[in-house]
Amino acid sequence: MTTDAPPGRRPRGRPGHDREAVLRTAIELFNRRGFDATSVSDLAAELGVTKSAVYHHFVSKEALLAAALDEALEGLSAAVEAAAVASDGQRSIVRLRTAVEAAVRILATHLPAVTLLLRVRGNSDVERSAMERRRHIDDRLSALVRQAAAEGDLRADVEPDVISRLVFGMVNSLTDWYRPGGPLDDAALAATVSGVLFDGLKPRDPAAGT
């Protein structure tokens, strides 16, 4: 007995797009229309397939959202966690800078998913879980800022909480203007953001008046 489909016919149940294509299109629609305003029917129409073809890959619209938010969060979590728990004797400022540069590269590489993450407002269990994971990342970075300040590697005239907000604000603002394919690739972007942030946050030399 063979399960091969006859030539020229698509095997029953096989969708017209793979899982990755479905997810990319869903993220684009969620960003453009809003998650609540986008239906599985809208997604199917955008892809030119039936709703069952979408459900072949994802059991629900919420499952699509969860996959999109996981894409944004997993890399960020791994980068920040690695910096937070490093035990190789590196100063906190080095680990903080490394974490920020990694976060910028991840944002640039996964810009649509990170944009979606920054727009969630806790309207569902999936969104609330993502927001909690994001808060954990923010807390880890804030702890590194406080450690770096305590070690004397950040400006003493700026409160650590303000520095944290400046770091988060600059990194998150990239979703508003950065577009892949421009003059800055992800590595150059990370170096530029890091340089502007941390050169400006270096401790001042009272003797030099700076």
Image (cartoon, helix red, strand yellow):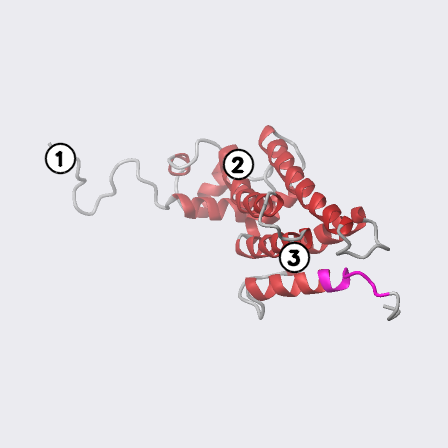
Q: Nearer the viewer, residue 58 or 54?
A: 58
Q: Hey, what amino acid is under mark 2?
A: Ala
What is the x, y in percent for residue 201?
77, 60
Instruction: Give the residue at x 61% y 30%.
Output: 124
Instruction: Give the residue at x 53% y 43%.
Output: 74
What is the x, y in percent for residue 158?
84, 53
Q: Which mark is residue 66?
A: 2
Secondary structure of the residue carrying numbered label 2:
helix
Residue corresponding to mark 3: 174
Q: Which residue is at the far left? A: 1
**Mark 2 Cα shell of 10 Å, populated few (<14), some (14-19), many (≥20):** some
Q: CA distance from mark 1 to mark 3?
A: 53 Å
**Mark 3 Cα shell of 10 Å, populated few (<14), some (14-19), many (≥20):** some
Q: Horizontal placement of 97 versus 71: left or right?
A: right
Q: Which residue is at the far top? A: 125
Q: Hey, what amino acid is under mark 3?
A: Leu
